[in-house]
Amino acid sequence: MSRDGTKRPEGPAGPEAGATLAFVESPVQLLNVLEWAYADGGGDPSPEQAAGGAPGGRPSPSAPEGLGAAGLGAAGLGADGLTVVVLSPHDPMTRGQLRRMAELARDEGITVRWEDARGGAGAPLKTIGGLRGPLRRAGRIVIGDPFSRYVQLLLTLTRAQDLVVVDDGTATMEFVSQLASGEPLVRWHRRGTGRGAREMVFAPVSATARRRLTPGGDRRVEVFSSMPVEPPAGVTVTANSFAWTRARFGPPRLTRGTDLVGTSLVETGVVDLERYLEAVATLARTHGATRYFAHRRESAEKLHRVAAEIGLEVVRPELPLELIARRGPIGHTIVSFPSTVVHTLPLALSGTGVKVAVCDVDPAWLRSDASPRAQGFLSGVTGTARDAHRLRSVPAATS
């Protein structure tokens, strides 16, 4: 059923014609699809809900324990024909968080289609073949990662005139900047020229996807973001205030301590491992931190050193940190390096009294082969965090 009350014709399988098809590859992307669907459907928490969570604070019977009330009445967020396609990655922690987020999405009335899109040599062809029909019928496409080659390939198969990009963390800032300047879509931490053999082969697909993400004619492009972005002409930006998260979960119980938030800057080849561990140790001593919330991409070896050498309790969240923090217990202060959470946690924790602080990355921490854009991008992430307290970088130890 469309928003004007007319019934859409149904296709032979998958979403009905004109419905919305969303593609996600990470838990944060799925969370932001839920936030977009809530905002798109007119959801807006009352002041008491925004500060204190869902009325009564009772979880729905089918929701994971302790996650809060779910659903927008009987219809839920999927009332307008939203289907979420999970293009599952290999990483076990990411897959686990995605399965938990998929439970929440189903509780909200959203159809979730799980695709083991990387489950072997024939998996991509099987996945793309199975999605060809739904892609042709969809009237609107929502994506979480415009840099994903998988998503770029799928975009070449759709006829949809409405395209929505939801936050994939700070990468959204880079996407909007590249779209505005006409640059190829390349992740900010990618080293080299981006002209290797694989990139050259894939270049036509990437160029086509970029054109699909550029508004023009009847094609409409929306960016749903909590990041500070300056959109190019024709692109609509809708603010993500984490209204769904605030309406569904909390308020959290606050501890007296400080929590540190880990990043994958070491794993992506940006920051030197030893410098990073030195900085974590210094922050823990300075701010009295006792817990370290691990990023889902952090290596087991690094986390073992955080626990054994620094003495922090390592917490591997089963859901995106915005939901974990909103559910609580959480420290009265949260300290992070430049990352998405310095923008999102102040929104998700609005009205709770939690202070979010961001520590600059010292240029001396960067690896010699890090992308030339790394320092400028990280400084921009920190400098544009409007509701986070800015800390000076921790001095690098001399060797």
Image (tube, rainbow, N blue to C red):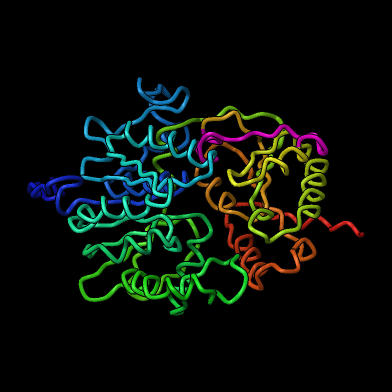
Residue 350 shown in magenta: no
Q: Residue furthest bottom?
A: 182
Q: Which residue is more in the foreground, 115 or 155?
A: 115
Q: Residue at x 24, y 56 (%)?
A: 132
Measured from the top left, where is residue 261 in percent x and y?
A: 65, 44
Q: Residue furthest front?
A: 121
Q: Residue at x 55, y 46 (%)?
A: 346
Q: Residue at x 35, y 63 (%)?
A: 153
Measured from the top left, where is residue 4 in percent x and y?
A: 11, 50
Quarter of the image that includes the N terminus: top left
Magenta residues, start to end = 307-326
Question: Is 208 located above or below residue 88 in the figure?
Answer: below
Q: Which residue is more in the foreground, 298 or 333?
A: 298
Q: Which of the 4 image quadrants contains residue 107?
A: top left
Question: Is 56 located above or below residue 7 in the figure?
Answer: above
Measured from the top left, where is residue 197 in percent x and y?
A: 51, 74
Residue 315 shown in magenta: yes
Residue 194 as seen in the image, left or right of residue 150: right
Residue 296 as seen in the image, left or right of residue 50: right
Q: Residue at x 42, y 37 (%)?
A: 101
Q: Which residue is more in the foreground, 356 or 29?
A: 29
Q: How many labels sit on residues?
A: 0
Quarter of the image that includes the C terminus: bottom right
Measured from the top left, where is residue 59 in percent x and y?
A: 40, 23
Q: Which residue is more in the foreground, 103 or 126?
A: 126
Question: Is 249 located above or below residue 34 in the figure?
Answer: above
Q: Residue furthest right?
A: 399
